[in-house]
Image (cartoon, rainbow, N blue to C red):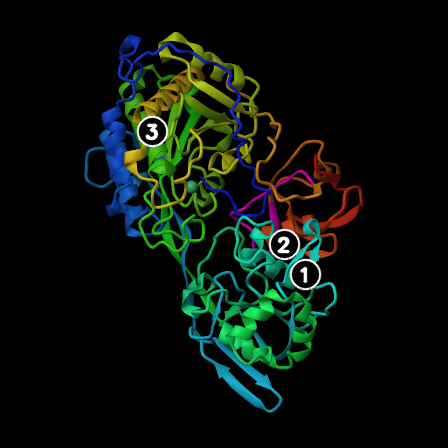
Amino acid sequence: MKFLRGTGTFRSINYSIITLLLTLTLVVMAQQPKPGGQATPEIEQLKKHLKYLASEKLEGRYPGSPGADKAAAYLAEQFNRYKLGCAEENLKCRHNGKDNSGYFKEFPFVAAVELAQNNSLIFKVSDTAGKIQLKTDWMPLGFSSNGNLASTQMVFTGFGITAADLQHDDYSKIDANGKIALAFASTPDGDNPHGKFGRYLDPRWKAAAAKDHGARALVLIAREENFTNDSLTKLSYDQTAGEAGLPVVVISRRMAARFLGLSDKAQLAQLEKARDQWGEAAENLKGSLSLSVDITRRTVPAYNVIGIIEGSDPKLKREYIVIGAHYDHLGRGNHSSRDPNSKEVHHGADDNASGTAGLLELARIFSVGRKELRRSILFIGFSAEESGLIGSHYYVNHPFIPLTDTLAMLNLDMIGRMRDDKLTVGGVGTAQILRKLVEEVNNASDSGSPLNLQLNEDGFGPSDHSSFYAKKIPVLFFFTGTHDDYHKPSDTADKINYEGQAKVVSLVSEIVRAFDQNDVRPTYTLARSESSGRSMSFRVSLGTVPNYADSNDGMLLDAVRDDSPAAKAGIKAGDKIVKLAGREIKNVYDYTYALGEMKPDQEVEVVVLRGNDRLQLKVTPQARK
Ligand SMILES: [Zn+2]
């Protein structure tokens, strides 16, 4: 599961539980054989898969790492054992040999950001110039653009925050145009991620603000006294939004004190708190910087693992039901860890060894009952979901089965923590028949006691089904809810509710059978979007669905909601927004930043790239409800 921190445009599930169905009848369902000899989920199988995937040995399954490769190999091995076809041409694949490579579909993944040759920072004040030591006193950030700036004036910008919704603008009285912006990496709330300025601990927002005010580079002042402890020095890369569009670096507090004409770090700490002294500090900042940033983003192969069961109906077998689960997780933690300083293995037992084990169990179940299937099933273990739905995004743009033949996508993400038989099923509004079908299957006697379902219309959400829904494929998303171990090393196998997990797998298998037996396939509809539980308090919305995995030189749109301001303006899915309300848009942060500065019912200009055309359109944002 992946929530893009702070943008608020990535809507999350509404966790309030609506009790739709309640029953006190206890039925031991998971282990009972179904009529007609159909296989059912086996708890021992689920346990075996999950324990292996969430073990120390797999080191948190970070894409491109040996641990993730082991997980991928394990999936392929099981697919082979169940005699699944593989994603080579004509479904030909060696089922019994040792070579499982046919199940792997490779895609590129940025595994690391590295320093290249030409990094330098020179501080010059009056006649004296000093070279600042890389790594000891300054570092580029992982999302920085490369660039060279000859001796350029600095400007002090406080926290470097522009936030109309919070009525805060550090740039209101200064001219940063053509200069290098110097800003504290902290916020008016200090380091508190839950304060109202919490999202500005993500330097992306400060980079967007600096760029918007014409700055040529952004220099952030480290939060940690000990420079190398600061998370900004780690060259980490969030994968989701491309590069910043200007050089962004962090400097030590020692060096910042020097820039600002202060005698030591204690004075700097005092200045950080005393905002009434910032005007004076800006006056005292007299030096200039020569800056050269040169970093390389190293790409490694990551793998989706794909297996196929072909249907038996000569005609219907052309239609595919996709069952997916991401098998990657956070490795030893990274920017999306909720325990960011931990170096421990993030086990990801619930997120998402649970869904992956479910996927494998479904592959086994349907391999046993393959003769009864009329349609075909594609089983996909996705990688790099946590990094921004990258694996599923890659798949839908390089599909193995034509998307028009893809009947629906069912996504299992975090199904291991069922409480009181509660299960969230998202996407029931993405095709007309889905709500009824899910309810009927759940109530049908042979699927055991009905689960307490929370049905949610929206097809977009923080996991891989979003990638499919954006391509107009009906989706269902199965999720047993969040918890305190989410994205922490403590998401471990001993906390899994295997009985509950088996119930989810059983329900999914029944839904797949219902799809298969239905003569008509579900037809895509654009679902109502659910209210967000964690949105940034935007005043306006345009009704666009940004593509998070692919934005570098504009904001590519995966979808545009019907009747939305964007639709009325003539903006279409597949358009790339490059300018909005006078602001250059390079990535999702620029876009979200621009949205934050817009006012309801005030028409603005938007420039989009569509194929080879550059279109100027007018859009009138509406007030967010
Ligand atoms: Zn996750």
Residue labelled with disc 1: 212
Residue labelled with disc 3: 358
As drawn, 304 above or below 563: below
Quadrant of the image where one finds ligand 1: top left
| Residue 546 drawn at (x, y percent) | 59, 44
Q: Residues within 10 Å of mark 2 (few under 14, many from 20)?
A: many
| Residue 252 drawn at (x, y percent) | 49, 72
Residue labelled with disc 2: 590
Q: Is mark 1 within 8 Å of ligand 1?
A: no
Left/right of residue 235 with respect to residue 544 in the rendered view: left
Left/right of residue 140 with respect to residue 531 in the rendered view: left
Return the disc, 2 or 3, that comes first in the chain's sequence.
3
Q: Secondary structure at mark 2?
A: helix
Question: What are the residue bounds of the magenta stretch?
Answer: 542-556
Three-letter residue code for mark 2: Asp
As drawn, 266 above or below 245: below
Residue 293 visible in this rendered orientation of the protein: no
Camera-side residue: 213 or 276?
A: 276
Return the disc, 1 or 3, that comes first in the chain's sequence.
1
Residue at 54% across, 48% down:
194
For this orientation, the residue located farthest to the right is 602
Cα–Cα gap, marks 2 and 3: 38 Å
Quadrant in which residue 525 is drawn: top right
Q: Main secondary structure of the magenta part?
A: loop
Cβ–Cβ under 8 Å for marks 2 and 1: yes
Residue 522 visible in this rendered orientation of the protein: yes
Three-letter residue code for mark 1: Asp
Quadrant in which residue 360 is drawn: top left
Camera-side residue: 562 or 131?
A: 131
Q: Secondary structure at mark 3?
A: helix
